[in-house]
């Protein structure tokens, strides 16, 4: 992975917390900040995928793909957040046809 240098301004509390985390993990602050940023982006993408799914703008499969997690994990997240599945009778019929055609 190519790494680029970025300069940014952060509140003192964030800097202090990141330094505590770096110390706990016995890492340098830059490594810790990169990991925290990566985790934040991953969480943002999962939340965005869930929101788009809840709005009916993307499919369950697309939400899992967008969040870079398994279909099972996205189902767990939907359940945790009490977001209903968008699964119609037509979806069920299509799935049954697909299964039957694979077994034929």
Image (cartoon, rainbow, N blue to C red):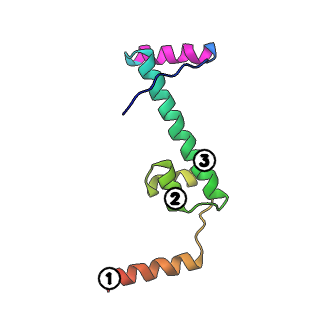
Q: Nearer the viewer, residue 82 or 50?
A: 50
| Disc 1 to disc 2, C-alpha distance | 26 Å
Q: Is residue 90 left or right of residue 2?
A: right
Residue located at (54% from left, 17% from top): 17
The residue at the far right in this view is: 55
Q: Position of residue 21 (x, y in %)?
A: 47, 18
Q: Which quadrant would the N terminus be assigned to in this image?
A: top left
Q: Position of residue 16 (x, y in %)?
A: 55, 13
* Residue 83 visible in the picture: no
* Residue 50 visible in the picture: yes
Q: Which residues are magenta?
A: 13-24
Q: Read off the residue under disc 3.
A: 48
Q: Is residue 18 magenta?
A: yes
Q: Is residue 43 magenta?
A: no
Marks 3 & 2, CB-CB < 8 Å contact: no
Residue located at (60% from left, 74% from top): 88
Which comes before the other along the chain, label 3 or label 2?
3
Helix, strand or loop status at disc 2: helix
Which comes before the other along the chain, label 1 or label 3?
3
Q: Read off the residue under disc 2.
A: 62
Marks 1 & 3, CB-CB < 8 Å contact: no
Above or below for 7 versus 42: above
Which comes before the other along the chain, label 1 or label 2?
2
Q: Position of residue 90 (x, y in %)?
A: 57, 79
Question: Which numbered marker is on residue 103?
Answer: 1
| Disc 1 to disc 3, C-alpha distance | 36 Å
Helix, strand or loop status at disc 1: helix
Residue located at (58% from left, 18% from top): 14
């Amino acid at each position: 992975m190519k790494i680029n240098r970025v300069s940014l301004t952060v509140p003192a509390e964030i800097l202090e917390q990141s330094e505590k985390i770096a110390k706990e993990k016995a890492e340098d602050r830059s490594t810790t900040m990169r990991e925290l940023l990566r985790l934040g982006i991953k969480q943002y993408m999962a939340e965005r995928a869930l929101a788009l799914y809840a709005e009916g703008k993307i499919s369950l499969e697309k939400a899992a793909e967008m969040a870079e997690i398994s279909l099972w994990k996205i189902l767990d997240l939907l359940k945790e957040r009490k977001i209903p599945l968008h699964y119609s009778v037509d979806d069920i019929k299509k799935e049954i046809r697909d299964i039957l055609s694979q077994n034929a």
